[in-house]
Image: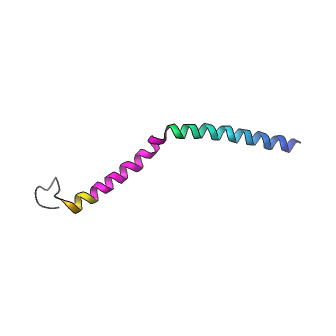
Amino acid sequence: MNSLRSAVDATVLAMVRGLIVALLVSTLDGAFMLPLGISAVTVGFGFRSRSTGPCWTCGPQRC
């Protein structure tokens, strides 16, 4: 019976801790995703500015 009690205690503890972490992560989702979105936009903007038009620092000629 002692091992059954340990298993139940471990299960309850894991579920409570998992629920708390899930709630914290879901409220901070935007903060975790922001670096991924910024880097993708920056890379896309770099490809677009290099391939389709003049560079703002070079003037009217292409970079």
Left/right of residue 10 with respect to residue 50 in the rendered view: right
Residue 29 against residue 54 in the figure, above or below: above
Left/right of residue 34 with respect to residue 17 in the rendered view: left
Image quarter of the C terminus: bottom left
Image quarter of the N terminus: top right
Residue beneath the point at 67% across and 37% down: 16
Residue beneath the point at 26% across and 58% down: 48
Q: Position of residue 17 (x, y in %)?
A: 65, 39
Bounds of the magenta span? Answer: 28-46
**Where is residue 49, by image quadrant?**
bottom left
Residue beneath the point at 81% across and 42% down: 6
Q: Is residue 63 magenta?
A: no
Left/right of residue 51 with respect to residue 32 in the rendered view: left
Q: Is residue 31 magenta?
A: yes
Magenta-colored segment: predominant secondary structure: helix
Q: Position of residue 8 (x, y in %)?
A: 79, 41
Residue beneath the point at 57% across and 37% down: 23
Left/right of residue 63 with respect to residue 20 in the rendered view: left
